[in-house]
Image: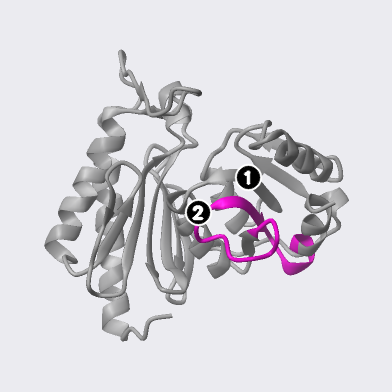
Amino acid sequence: MAQLSVDERQELISVAHELADAARGATLAHFRTLGLTAETKETQRFDPVTVADRLSEERMRDILARRRPQDAILGEEYGAQPGTSGLTWVLDPIDGTRSYLCGTPTWGVLISVADATGPVYGLIDQPYIGERFEGGFGVARMVGPHWTRPLQVRPARPLAECIIMSTFPEVGTAEEGAAFHRLAAQCRLTRYGTDCYAYALLAAGHIDLVVEAGLQPYDVQAPIAVIEAAGGVMTGWTGAPAHQGGRVLAASSPEVHAAALAILNG
């Protein structure tokens, strides 16, 4: 981890919250509005992007240009911008645009700051519900309309008592989907469709596992920071770091993580 002073860490936290506040305004301006449309970024499948995705990232980039011009940026909609500080802001302006289009409040804004070793601080923000999950620099907490609480993952338990979540039942390729369903069959309850909110639920101690595939760095870096700060584990399916995305396994404990890895890898 970069050697950052207390003041530098507080500055990064302050900037992250300003970014999240700006993204809230941008995304809520269009959420559940009649006539909201989306373009698709791919031809083989529907990969939507809306005016809100772009506006959210634009507003965050404007803040970074003013407050942290020395830092690099990696964003889903506008790509990579180099920096000189050794720190990179990784932005997903709407994680779960499909959910956003459907009007379900399980999408979120993902914001993290990373050094050469990976994410060191992150936010998972759900603007419509008004919940914000924060992890890194010695902080692990969620703030919402009903309470402010520390984040703490669930204690270890057998897979037969675990709750597992994923965004899509198909989970990537046919091979990846088969591996997921092998694991899900060993768990007590399987739920789908919550995008980044599943990682927030794991960090808050409500579920035990999140398993996904085909992810990008901006999909995973904020969840990694939040889950690790809450005491959980998040890696690739081989147990290697997952900072660059791909196949991802998040678990509430090292014991649950090890048991899940064994099944995912046959």
The residue under the point 30% across, 43% down is: 24
**How many numbered marks are there?**
2
Task: Please state which amino acid type lies under the numbered disc 2.
Answer: Val
Is residue 154 rendered to the left or right of residue 92?
A: right
Task: Please state which amino acid type lies under the numbered disc 1.
Answer: Glu
The numbered mark at residue 220 is 2
Is residue 205 rendered to the left or right of residue 149?
A: right
Percent x, y for residue 11?
25, 73
Q: Distance from label 1 to label 2 (Cα)?
A: 10 Å
Q: Quadrant of residue 176?
A: top right
Q: Mark 2, residues whose alpha carbon is within 10 Å: few (<14), some, or many (≥20)?
A: many
Q: Which residues are magenta?
A: 236-257
Q: Is residue 243 above or below residue 52?
A: below
Percent x, y for residue 148?
46, 59
Percent x, y for residue 246?
57, 50
Percent x, y for residue 253?
72, 65
229 or 72, which lies in front? 72
Q: Secondary structure at mark 2?
A: helix
Q: Residue furthest left?
A: 66
Q: Quadrant of residue 238?
A: bottom right
Q: Mark 1, residues whose alpha carbon is within 10 Å: few (<14), some, or many (≥20)?
A: many
Q: Is residue 193 above or below residue 235?
A: above
Q: Which residue is mark 1?
A: 212
Q: Is residue 242 magenta?
A: yes
